[in-house]
């Protein structure tokens, strides 16, 4: 059966093959099927024939931007650390980009991690990706052996059961509240743009937490991170995290202890999320990568909400709009200041 | 340091203040010159500019057991380094909202602009912050229990 | 020790060489700036100040427009710099009695009145004033508060020394009585036997900066000033607003201390008013300060204030002023174009009833809680007497007389003037003139540079890298200032027990001369390699103690202070135990931090002693000559094929001087000057390097090396093609085109029977919101010229506000008296211009009489104002400097650094900064040259030691640091894709450190390690 995703898969394969054959790109970054049902993994096609292994389906959850800086370095001619950059243009790489991934690419361009002229971007309007954990919950946690994807449904099959699931019911949380499904930069459009969405309650989950008391929020936060095993899968999946030495590994000074003591874990999550302030596109990779089911997206979502509310910008929408922490306005809001009258934007966010 | 009992009469909050050299630190000096009295709970660390203060440092103060933190710089437009306080204003606004979202009590982290001429204002802000922190009780949420 | 011996001329190798010293008279912002510029470029300066401290009028202001900077805050660092300068000797309570001799060799007689407090002993603890029983009106607050007979002029006074006012002191007036201050003074600084001293100073030049005095409105009866307590002057209002003033920054009106809800400002009190005040001129600053006071008062009241300004013309012609005015309108300040004729006491409370006629002549009455009189500026009586003693000529407005082409030179050679003494002006123009005055003063003294200056030398420094920390702690009693509250011995003993502390001692006065010398000895003897002084504030005393470290042979950055006085004993006077605990914490924090300090280099860059000047107009040529005359080689680059720029089209200055002869003269000087390398038809193509060492590529393919650059690229007239018949009718001209007719073919204008000037043609509109400032005056000058050519010509000026600021007002009065007709329009009633056959038809509604007028001028002049050049943005990118929202170059600080870019070693002058008249351009060019001379006169210039440094292994090259650096000091090295710091440009603010997510940037000695050590020590979690 021909669905949007199967059509897109064919188009990706054709375009990737063309780009690799013509030599325009040296590598093409997309997805291929994973070993388990409902999984995919990032895949680099280097020869035209590799293009046949590329797929596009509802389980392409990892943010490809995360792999771009390394891949770009990888295709450069080898050179020593002190050698000057080679003369002439460096080889290009092809990549798939949905709304959020393309915005991460923009952020990476702004932060000098990738160069626009070395990328051939195949833009895809995202219909939203499916949360595997939600699908499994729909079948009571039974092992799923096969999945057939329809246009708006999934048929899952296991030992002794077969169930049709409405796709919309099992979309990832971030995809449900996504307002920018279409890529902001691309060279070729694959498939059709997805109608723009304006979602009521885009920050609903954040609003709910803001409505709690300070005590309740602290309990929520502590409860959320209590299962954290400090494996850093969230950090590793994040296209924004590329420091050679992460703050968690600093020793002079040591910002955060290496234990799973709640204080250390709290500080890890606070700083990790804060480092994403104004840069995060809510791609959801962190949550998808987390083996413990921690909803760390909510941390960055809060920052996304505040940046939009205070400074009117969203990460990666336009390479010419500076990232919010690299600029200022003379009349930026400052109701957080202590005032003499004792008033202060205390329980902020509720106003 | 007894962090276990809020009701312990001995407990006095300890507040770390980061003051920029050019305005707020001078404002604190002026409070002294003018003999404006304020509670003795504050420990001032002089920094070149409020723009020098990163959220990491603020977290570290809380982690080290500070019951409250105050950061003060020049008023917008007065920065000795042109724009340090304006970048800082964004960092602080986001960070304060963020950690309060995660359940750190409002009032632990405090920010103000105090000029070199605002000695009385400095004394008032310190008094205000001290009272607020005292009402919150000892900060425990980011302090490891030993 | 105060008597200055006659310095033997033999100090200079050649006995005919001029003196290498300069006298500056007046310690306000202008005098301070002139003194600093001169001392920094190699001259010894005597700064003579009439009162007990420098600071002048600016120190009394609350905020300053248009940035709303706190006045004291931005001024104070300059005062401190002046006070600490090795080559500035401040003579307070002093007057100049006479100046004899010639330029290059003046003999100045100065009388220094007694202070009765030994400044070498006074520690400014204030205990004397605490005890003094005599309360007297505080002049600093204009009598709105009281001070004691022994007093500090204001909290940030420089020198920070008390003085006894002999008019009021009980002891001085009745010997044997009182004397309490002498008894309490812990430093034994009181000297009732102090006497006046006269001394002779030998100087090469004199710069006068006596400043202004606010007009006293006591005789302007209708205002009620003096009778009605809630009528105050603007200067009094500044004090009422000021956080350090009588209301501690919370405005209350004088009669009943109520918070006013309705305030009126009356403009032009003592200005533009020959009848009542004798002042025909406009005071130039009052419109802006009234707006500022209204805005600040309204902000302080959180909007709960009706602020009304009653004015004749709203004059906001300076940089960013019009935008400030527009914002004030948006913020709800009311502007009434009306002159109030009566202020009466109201029946209610102490309120005031204002009667005025509005623009249409309708009588109105309105009640206010308070009235502020926007008083004008005049030369003080003291300054008039000084001018008289020195033979300095005054102009008819009784300001010091100056020439349009030499705006800071007085009639007496070698004596210069700057600031409001030569005409009403605001702070930035005073500061500009101060630097210009410095330039004129040093211009002919150049051969004697560095002959009278002093320099400190220090022994070589011990290398302490390998040594474990040995910290010495010196705890100060400060008499009873600290010791009276804090248990100093306990703090000392506590310090001894801290890890790393090798020595601890307490002193009565750590800053006293003998303690300082002993401290140096102790450092050497005990082998200390880190030092803590627990005493007062590092803001005043750190340099002194750091110098002691250098004298003891260790690096001055191995030092830290614990502020246990200003921030401890003085603010916890009733809690000795808590204060003592706090002192221990502060010492512990300082020790923890200083142990991580490293010796830092005293950085400097060597200076290429030549300059680049870009732009060959009046400003560029003036700057080039100013430097070349001092012997510095200058490359003058001009885009066009001739020198002269805008001035080639200019007929007369507003003062009436013909421009073309002057231009011819200065052009010839530039062309023949042996030190000026003139490059016509040339532009800048690349710029590398930074202050001291620029390498600039020119369009002719050559590269020049220079230490400084002055950008003076001018601006252009706005040409309203296709509007108002411009370019369509031959009798429609923009202003400078009419000047060209005056120059080339004045006869052709004689036949014109009617002329119309349209002011603000394309200015003060949303597309070009700024006011060009010069067009009103220029148009009126031209109208008067037309009247000279044809006295019967009917001339109509269509205007929005007439902005003939300062002494230009005289021209406006002359124009009115000559029958030139002024018709006001506004944006809702724009004049219409149409072609009617061959003729021009102008239709305008007269807002005063509310009638339409139809004019048929034979000449229509469009006063189109000035437009910034496109090259501004190109050059700003090359020199890494900033551009304002209006498209002009942006100075480092609107008030106090009006010719500097934030980028060191680059300066601006002339129209590229903002529209200005020719005298202002010349002064600015001289000022730019003076600022540049500071760099060029040194072999090497010091740069910041506490700079940022990048650990490239941790750097991601993301560039956040480059965006947050205001100085372009950190950039991504394209070869490696990592950040690196140009320590010559870095100012050590640490914005990059806080911005870096990877912890790859640190600030030397104020890195995260040091700050965290202090934090953790504060919480005792080390």
Image: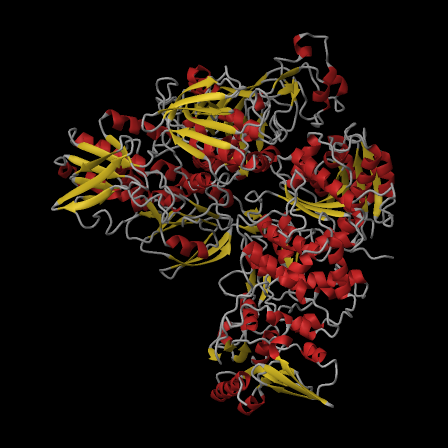
In depth, the one of B28 and C445 nearer the eye is: B28
* Residue displayed at 51% across by 39% down: C896
Evaluate whether residue A240 shows in this view.
yes
Count how many numbered circles sit on residues in the image.
0
Vertical side of C930 occupied by C874: above or below: below
Instruction: Locate the N terminus of chain C and report the quarter of the image it occupies.
Output: top right
Taking the spot 48% from the left edge, 47% from the top edge, the residue there is C901
Q: Quadrant of residue B38?
A: top right
The type of colouring in the image is: secondary structure
Foreground of the two, C430 or A271: A271
- Left or right side of C830 for C506: right
Q: Nearer the viewer, residue C204 or C168?
A: C168
In the rendered image, is residue C616 in sight? no
Q: Is residue A176 left or right of residue C354?
A: right
Q: Nearer the viewer, residue C265 or B47?
A: C265
Residue visible at 48% across and 63% down? Answer: A320
Residue B71 image position (x, y, % from top left):
68, 46
| Residue C958 shown left or right of residue B39 in the figure | left
Residue C956 rendering spot, x and y as whole percentages: 62, 66
Q: Quadrant of residue C278?
A: top left
Picture coordinates of residue A71 (x, y %)? Answer: 59, 78
Q: Position of residue A58 (x, y in %)?
A: 60, 80
Above-or-below relation of C60 to A211: above
The answer to whether A87 is drawn above or below residue B141 in the figure is below
């Amino acid at each position: 059966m021909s669905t949007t995703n199967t059509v897109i898969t064919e188009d990706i394969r054709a375009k990737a093959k063309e780009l690799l054959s013509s030599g325009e790109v040296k590598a093409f970054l997309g997805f291929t099927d994973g070993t388990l049902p409902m999984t995919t993994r990032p895949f680099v096609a280097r020869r035209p024939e590799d293009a046949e292994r590329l797929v596009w389906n509802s389980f392409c959850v990892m943010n490809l931007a995360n792999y771009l800086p390394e891949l770009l370095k990888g295709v450069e001619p080898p050179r020593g650390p002190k050698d000057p950059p080679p003369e002439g243009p460096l080889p290009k790489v092809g990549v798939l980009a949905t709304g959020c991934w393309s915005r991460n690419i923009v952020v990476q361009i702004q932060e000098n991690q990738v160069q626009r002229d070395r990328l051939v971007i195949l833009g895809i309007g995202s219909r939203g990706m499916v949360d595997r954990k939600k699908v499994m919950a729909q079948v009571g946690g039974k092992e799923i052996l096969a999945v057939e994807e329809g246009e708006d449904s999934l048929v899952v099959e296991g030992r002794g059961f077969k169930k049709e699931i409405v796709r919309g019911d099992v979309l990832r949380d971030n995809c449900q509240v996504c307002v920018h499904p279409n890529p902001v930069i691309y060279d070729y459009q694959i498939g059709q743009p997805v109608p723009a969405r304006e979602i009521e309650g885009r920050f609903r989950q954040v609003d709910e937490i803001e409505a709690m008391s300070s005590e309740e929020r602290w309990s929520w936060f502590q409860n959320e991170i209590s299962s954290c095993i400090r494996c850093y899968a969230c950090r590793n999946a994040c296209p924004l995290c590329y420091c050679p030495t992460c703050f968690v590994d600093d020793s002079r000074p040591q910002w955060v202890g290496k234990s799973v003591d709640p204080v250390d874990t709290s500080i890890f999550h606070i700083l990790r999320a804060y480092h994403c302030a104004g840069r995060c596109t809510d791609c959801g990779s962190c949550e998808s990568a987390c083996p413990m089911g921690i909803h760390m997206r909510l941390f960055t979502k809060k920052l996304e909400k505040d940046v939009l509310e205070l400074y009117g910008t969203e990460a990666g929408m336009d390479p010419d709009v500076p990232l919010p922490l690299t600029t200022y306005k003379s009349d930026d809001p400052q109701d957080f200041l202590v005032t003499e009258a004792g008033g202060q934007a205390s329980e902020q966010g509720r106003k | 340091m007894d962090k276990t009992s809020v009701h312990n009469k001995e407990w006095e909050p300890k507040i770390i203040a980061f003051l920029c050299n050019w305005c707020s630190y001078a404002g604190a000096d002026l409070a002294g010159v003018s003999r404006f009295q304020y509670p003795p709970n504050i420990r001032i660390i002089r920094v070149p500019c409020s723009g020098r203060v990163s959220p990491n440092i603020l977290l570290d103060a809380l982690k080290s057991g500070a019951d409250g933190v105050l950061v003060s710089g020049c008023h917008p437009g007065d920065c000795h380094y042109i724009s340090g306080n304006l970048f800082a204003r964004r960092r602080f606004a986001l960070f304060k909202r963020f950690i309060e979202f995660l359940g750190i009590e409002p009032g632990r982290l405090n920010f103000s602009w105090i000029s070199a001429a605002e000695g009385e204002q400095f004394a008032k802000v310190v008094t205000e912050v001290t009272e607020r922190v005292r009402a919150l009780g000892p900060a425990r949420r980011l302090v490891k229990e030993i | 020790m105060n008597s200055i011996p006659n310095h033997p001329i033999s100090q200079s190798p050649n006995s005919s060489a001029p003196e290498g010293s300069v006298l500056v008279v007046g310690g306000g912002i202008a005098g301070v700036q002139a003194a600093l510029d001169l001392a920094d470029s190699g001259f010894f300066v005597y700064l003579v100040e009439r009162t007990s401290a420098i600071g002048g009028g600016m120190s009394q202001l609350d905020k300053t427009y248009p940035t709303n900077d706190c006045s004291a805050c931005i001024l104070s660092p300059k005062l401190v710099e002046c006070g600490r300068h090795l080559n500035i000797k401040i003579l307070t309570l002093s007057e100049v009695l006479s100046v004899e001799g010639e330029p290059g060799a003046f003999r100045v007689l100065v009388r220094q009145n007694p202070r009765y407090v030994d400044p070498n002993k006074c520690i400014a603890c204030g205990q004397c004033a605490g005890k003094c029983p005599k309360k007297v009106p505080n002049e600093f607050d204009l009598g709105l508060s009281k001070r004691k007979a022994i007093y500090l002029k204001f909290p940030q006074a420089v020198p920070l020394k008390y003085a006894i006012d002999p008019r009021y002191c009980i002891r001085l007036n009745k010997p044997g009585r009182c004397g309490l201050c002498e008894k309490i003074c812990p430093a034994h600084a009181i000297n009732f036997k102090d006497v006046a001293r006269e001394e002779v100073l030998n100087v090469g030049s004199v710069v006068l900066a006596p400043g202004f005095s606010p007009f006293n409105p006591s005789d302007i009866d209708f205002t009620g000033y003096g009778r009605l307590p809630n009528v105050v002057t603007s200067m009094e209002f500044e004090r009422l607003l000021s956080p350090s003033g009588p209301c501690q920054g919370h405005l209350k009106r004088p009669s009943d201390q109520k918070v006013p809800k309705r305030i009126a400002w009356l403009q032009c009190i003592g200005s533009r008013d020959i009848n009542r005040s004798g002042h025909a001129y406009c005071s130039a600053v009052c419109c802006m300060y009234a707006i500022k006071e209204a805005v600040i008062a309204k902000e302080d009241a959180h909007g709960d204030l009706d602020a009304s300004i009653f004015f004749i013309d709203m004059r906001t012609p300076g940089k960013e002023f019009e935008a400030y005015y527009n914002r004030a309108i948006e913020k709800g300040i009311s502007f009434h174009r009306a002159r109030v004729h009566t202020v009466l006491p109201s029946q209610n409370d102490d309120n005031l009833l204002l009667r005025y006629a509005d623009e249409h002549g309708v009588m109105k009455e309105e009640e206010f809680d308070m009235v502020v009189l926007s008083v004008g500026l005049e030369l003080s009586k003291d300054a008039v007497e000084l001018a008289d003693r020195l033979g300095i000529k005054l102009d008819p407005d009784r300001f010091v007389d100056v020439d349009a082409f030499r705006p800071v030179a007085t009639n007496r050679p070698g004596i210069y003037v700057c600031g409001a003494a030569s005409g009403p002006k605001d702070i930035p123009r005073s500061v500009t003139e101060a630097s210009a005055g410095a330039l004129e003063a040093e211009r002919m003294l150049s051969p004697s540079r560095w002959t009278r200056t002093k320099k400190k030398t220090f022994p070589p420094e011990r290398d302490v890298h390998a040594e474990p920390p040995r910290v010495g702690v010196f705890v100060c009693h400060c008499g009873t200032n600290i010791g009276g509250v804090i248990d100093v011995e306990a703090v000392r003993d506590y310090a001894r027990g801290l890890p790393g502390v090798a020595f601890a001692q307490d002193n009565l006065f750590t800053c006293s001369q003998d303690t300082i010398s002993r401290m140096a000895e102790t450092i050497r003897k005990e082998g200390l390699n880190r030092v803590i002084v627990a005493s007062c504030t590092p803001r005043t005393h750190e340099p002194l103690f750091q110098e002691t470290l250098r004298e003891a042979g260790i690096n001055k950055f191995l030092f830290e202070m614990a502020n246990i006085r200003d921030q401890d004993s003085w603010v916890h006077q009733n809690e000795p135990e808590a204060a003592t605990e706090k002192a221990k914490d502060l010492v512990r924090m300082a020790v923890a931090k200083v142990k991580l300090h490293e010796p830092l280099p005293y950085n400097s860059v060597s200076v290429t002693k030549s300059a680049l000047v870009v732009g060959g107009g009046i400003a560029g040529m003036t700057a080039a000559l100013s430097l070349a005359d001092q012997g510095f080689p200058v490359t003058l680059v001009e885009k066009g094929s001739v020198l002269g720029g805008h001035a080639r089209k200019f007929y007369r200055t507003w003062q009436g001087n013909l421009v073309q002869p002057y231009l011819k003269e200065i052009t010839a000087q530039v062309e023949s000057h042996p030190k000026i390398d003139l490059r016509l038809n040339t532009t800048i193509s690349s710029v590398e390097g930074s202050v001291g060492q620029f390498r600039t590529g020119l369009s002719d393919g050559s590269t020049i090396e220079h230490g400084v650059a002055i950008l003076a690229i001018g601006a252009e007239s706005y040409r309203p093609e296709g509007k108002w018949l411009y370019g369509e009718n031959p009798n429609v001209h923009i202003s400078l085109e009419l000047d060209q007719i005056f120059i080339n073919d004045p006869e052709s204008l004689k036949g014109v029977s009617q002329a119309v000037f349209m002011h603000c043609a394309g200015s003060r509109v949303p597309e070009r919101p700024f006011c060009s400032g010069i067009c009103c005056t220029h148009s009126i000058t031209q109208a008067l010229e037309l009247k000279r050519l044809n006295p019967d010509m009917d001339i109509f000026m269509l205007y929005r506000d007439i902005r003939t600021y300062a002494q230009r007002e005289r021209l406006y009065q002359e124009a009115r008296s000559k029958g030139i007709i002024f018709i006001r329009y506004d944006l809702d009633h724009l004049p219409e211009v149409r072609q009617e056959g061959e003729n021009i038809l102008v239709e305008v509604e007269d807002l005063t009489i509310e009638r339409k007028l139809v004019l048929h001028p034979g000449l229509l002049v469009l006063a189109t104002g000035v437009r910034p050049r496109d090259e501004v943005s190109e050059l700003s990118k090359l020199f890494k400097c900033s551009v304002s929202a209006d498209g002009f170059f942006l100075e480092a600080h609107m008030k106090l650094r009006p010719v500097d870019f934030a980028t060191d070693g680059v300066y601006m002058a002339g129209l590229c900064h903002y529209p200005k008249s020719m005298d202002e351009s010349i002064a600015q060019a001289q000022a730019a040259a003076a600022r540049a001379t500071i760099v060029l006169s040194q072999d090497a210039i010091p740069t910041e030691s506490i700079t940022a440094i990048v650990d490239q292994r941790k750097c991601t090259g993301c560039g956040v640091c480059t965006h947050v650096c205001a100085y372009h000091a950190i950039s991504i090295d394209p070869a490696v894709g990592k950040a690196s710091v140009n320590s010559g440009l870095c100012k050590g603010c640490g914005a990059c450190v806080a911005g870096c997510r990877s912890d790859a940037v640190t600030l030397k000695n104020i890195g995260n390690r040091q700050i965290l050590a202090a934090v953790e020590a504060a919480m005792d979690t080390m």
